[in-house]
Image (cartoon, rainbow, N blue to C red):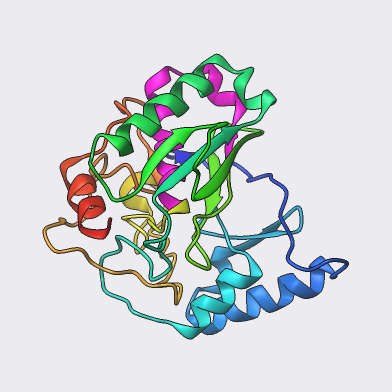
Amino acid sequence: MFKRAAVFVVSCGALLAGCGTDPQVENQEIISNLIESGIPADDIRVVEDAVYVGNDAHVTLEASREMLQRGESSKELVYTTNLVSTSVTKICINPTSSFNSYTRLSQGLDMAIANYNALGLRITFMRGPSTGCSANITATTMAGTGGSAGFPSGGKPYGTINIGTGLNSYNVDVNEHVITHEIGHTIGLRHSDYYNRSISCGGAATNEGTAGVGAILIPGTPTPTPGGSIMNSCYPPDTNGEFTSSDITGLQYIY
């Protein structure tokens, strides 16, 4: 999730599956799986031993293997085939002490959680620490004014959202927008303008590819427009941080 017409290098650590495994070997398999699933090679990045697609979506080894086994697609993206299972009903988002030290990031997290809970979905979100959590997500910080996350695997949401500390100098609505966007990735939402990132970012008409993880159209959701979805690749500087009507339609359809 980046500001419109700007690109920032994603920087975050990766949780590697398997004790003592070589991250380079794992990354080679992840990249191979992604390419075989249909993702263009020039849309795959390795940053600090973590593999990303679409600039802000971290792909784990397990998730890449699931992608390889599935493959629905359409011309318009809304969600992936990797979703949160029905056994997950309460997702707790646990901010680190570093995250909490940034006032607007902390406020943005509360507002993002409220965005989802206002929709009456089968999953609810809670700011942790809390009890009775079906799954947990850590909210931590990274450099820059963007964010990163990943897609679900094994029926669980992706376990981390990384939010740029530079956002603390932006208004709280921008913080709300970026955090809401990254939470969306953790439960299976892809960029609504994945097939043409210039819709929200400007510049070249970059296509992220169907990714093998699915680019599944939800009935009643329109073709993406600038500012038309909180899941657009890049955010406008005048965002209000709220879901659009098509975002609400999509989320209620899935969950």
The image shows residue 136 at horizontal and vertical percentages of 55, 46
Q: Is residue 117 visible?
A: yes
Which quarter of the figure is the C terminus placed in? bottom left
Give the residue drawn at x 57%, y 68%: 42
Relative to 218, does residue 115 appear above or below in the rendering?
Answer: above
Which corner quadrant of the image does residue 245 belong to?
top left
**Residue 176 vertical placement versus 82 (above, below):** above
Where residue 235 sits: x, y (%)? Answer: 38, 37
Query: In the visual, does 159 lie left or right of 54?
Result: right
Could you say where residue 191 lies in the image, as x and y percent from the top left?
A: 37, 55
Q: How many marks?
A: 0
Give the residues in magenta: 161-185
Q: Position of residue 172 (x, y in %)?
A: 42, 19
Q: Between 141 and 239, which is closer to the camera in this rendering?
A: 141
Decide if residue 1 is in sight here. no
Is 79 positioned to the left or the right of 53 in the image? left
Farthest right residue? Answer: 20
Q: Is residue 38 left or right of residue 200?
A: right
Instruction: Assess whether residue 91 is covered by the magenta stretch.
Output: no
Residue at 58% across / 50% down in the picture?
159
Question: Residue at (43%, 82%) from the top-left corner?
Answer: 70
